[in-house]
């Protein structure tokens, strides 16, 4: 059974800092990994999708890496802004996608102005 | 493109009642998955529908059932509601390739269900 862990659970940093969010998974037989953002009481917004054959993906100030052999993914946020404050969730897809996504509990991020 | 839409946005039900939640997938998507998210937790997979059939199911009791219609929209039904069913219910849509592999998942805004 896939298990996903995210560290840290919460993070508060001043605006402008670069930061790294960590995600680990127990079963390396994934076919992709997605990072999501969730604002309070809202749905999930897809940020980045990394296929199992890829090592990283970039979108604007966001960069996500994937190391299947070690069961780890990181989300790097450059030059953080107050608008980046949200909960960030990573999710691993197994079983060709039919097994659904297995989520971590998320990292609650606060960017101080 | 309206993206994934869910209705209603909020719902209050009494313990023991039944509820139906609805989801319309993103244009071009044929697969719908449902998730339950308790406060402070990550979403938990309930089940997935593809070609109008339940393709896979998470660790949820039979009180949770669903349906997918020919236009790919989907319903989640929960019978005999318990207080513990109070949560944010999220619908995700994706496209499944000819090899049966699911693509990127896009989520709706969710339905907040409160059971009293």
Image (spheres, coloured by chain):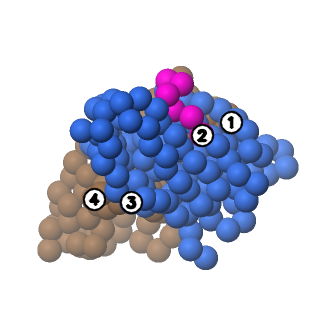
Chain colours: A brown, B blue
**Label 2 vs label 1, nearer the camera:** 2
- Mark 2 and mark 1 in contact? Answer it, CB < 8 Å: yes
- Mark 4 and mark 3 in contact? Answer it, CB < 8 Å: no
- Identify the residue under disc 4: A40
- Identify the residue under disc 3: B9
Q: Earlier in the sequence, mark 1 or mark 3?
A: 3
Protein chain holding label 4:
A
Crowding at dot 1, Cα within 10 Å, few <14 / some 14-19 / many 20+, comes out as: some
Give the quarter of the figure containing the C terminus of chain B: top left
Marks 2 and 4, how far apart in space? 27 Å
Spot occupied by residue B81 in the image (x, y as percentages of width and height): 38, 32
**Label 1 vs label 3, nearer the camera:** 3
Q: Give the range drawn in magenta.
A: B61-66
- Mark 3 and mark 2 in contact? Answer it, CB < 8 Å: no
Outermost residue toward the right in this view: B98
- Identify the residue under disc 1: B54
Q: Earlier in the sequence, mark 2 or mark 1?
A: 1
Find numbered disc 3 in the image and state the secondary structure of the residue it sits on.
loop
Spot occupied by residue B45 in the image (x, y as percentages of width and height): 51, 37
- Identify the residue under disc 2: B66
Q: In this view, does A71 lie to the left or right of A50?
A: left
């Amino acid at each position: 059974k896939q298990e996903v862990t995210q560290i840290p659970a919460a993070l508060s940093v001043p605006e402008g800092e670069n930061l790294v969010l960590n995600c680990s998974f127990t079963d390396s037989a994934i076919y992709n990994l997605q990072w999501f953002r969730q604002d309070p009481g809202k749905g999930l917004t897809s940020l980045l999708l990394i296929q199992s054959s890829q090592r990283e993906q970039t979108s604007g100030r966001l960069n996500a890496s994937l190391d299947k052999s070690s069961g780890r993914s990181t989300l790097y946020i450059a030059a953080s802004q107050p608008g980046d404050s949200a909960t960030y969730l990573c999710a691993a897809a197994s079983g060709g996608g039919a097994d659904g996504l297995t989520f971590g509990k998320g990292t609650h991020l606060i960017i101080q102005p | 493109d309206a993206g994934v839409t869910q209705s209603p946005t909020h719902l209050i039900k009494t313990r023991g009642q039944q509820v139906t939640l609805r989801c319309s997938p993103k244009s071009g998507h044929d697969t719908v998955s449902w998730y339950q998210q308790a406060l402070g937790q990550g979403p938990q997979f309930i089940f997935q529908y593809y070609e109008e059939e339940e393709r896979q199911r998470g660790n949820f009791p039979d009180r949770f059932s669903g349906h997918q219609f020919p236009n790919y929209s989907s319903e989640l039904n929960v019978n005999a509601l318990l207080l513990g069913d109070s949560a944010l219910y999220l619908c995700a849509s994706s496209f499944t390739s000819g090899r049966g592999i699911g693509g990127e998942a896009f989520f709706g805004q969710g339905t907040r269900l409160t059971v009293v």
